[in-house]
Amino acid sequence: MRFSWLGLYAVLYLVFLYAPVVLLPIFAFNDGTIIAFPLQGFTTEWFGELGRTAALHDAVQASLLIAVTSAILATCLGMCAARASTMSRFPGKQGAIGFVMIPLVLPEIIVAVSLLIVVRQVLGLSLSNWTIILAHTLICVPFCIAVLNGAFQNLDPSMEEAAMDLGESRWGAFRKITLPLVAPGIVSSLLISFTISLDEFIIAFFLSGNTPTMPVYIWGLLRFPEKLPVVMALGTILVALSVILLTIAEYFRRRGLARAGLKDTGGFLG
């Protein structure tokens, strides 16, 4: 009986979580501007409208620039932190790592308002894509550390030591031995950070300059009811892209575990 109730709970939870996502493509192909049943017909007009909207193109370009740059910066910083936390011993290590991971538990609205005050009132900087990049790097670093911790924990430190005994420098041993072994984790970290940055709204809303990011642009469209089908079409593309990227990231994560000969205990996709 307990298993039956657990199964029922799991089904209801999945329906509650994913039913709104399933509605996106349904109304994205609906030939009507009113988001309601019954459907009026099949059309791809709303996807074509995306290609004719210049403001959307600018928002997509800004989001891609921010997401790629944030992913690279966050992964580099996360790789340094993960290596230090798993392969080094120093006073205050646990406290330092805990401090870096704080953005995982802080509400984004608090982070956004705090960063806005620091950027505008303390530093006197203008809002631009770079302010969003710095903020997204801040919130993506903990996720990168969580992914890369597993990659570095699976390594045997004696391999680097053996390479240095054979004449390699510390950097050469890291580049030739460690880096190829943690490469699947690095790719996974890049993809996850890219997805988080691309979909993030609250911080981008507070820190965006003249060119809004794609989520901020979508929020602006919600004020116009006749634009809702276009939002549905764009949302369908974003959901598909997010699922593809997370699937690839999970593949590389599991590939890294397989190369290390370890058993998978769960990941981003279960």
Image (cartoon, rainbow, N blue to C red):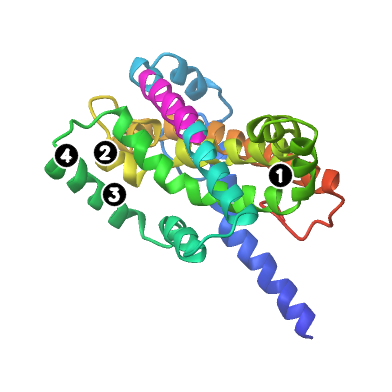
User: What's the magenta region?
Assistant: 58-71
Tell me how far mark 1 sits from mark 3, CA to CA. 29 Å
The residue that disc 4 covers is 123
Dot 2 or dot 3, earlier in sequence = 3
Q: Secondary structure at mark 2?
A: helix
Task: Check disc 1 and give the amino acid type.
Answer: Glu
* Relative image position of residue 267 (x, y in whole percent): 70, 54
Q: Residues within 10 Å of mark 1 (few under 14, many from 20)?
A: many
Along the horizontal axis of the image, is 158 left or right of 127? right
Quadrant in which the N terminus is drawn: bottom right
Q: Is residue 207 above or below residue 9?
A: above
Tell me how far mark 4 sits from mark 3, CA to CA. 15 Å
Q: Is residue 112 above or below residue 71?
A: below
Which residue appears at 48% of the width and 24% of the height?
46
Instruction: In the rendered structure, find residue 207 and report the number of the disc placed on it.
Output: 2
The residue that disc 1 covers is 250
Instruction: In the rendered structure, find residue 112 and report the number of the disc placed on it.
Output: 3
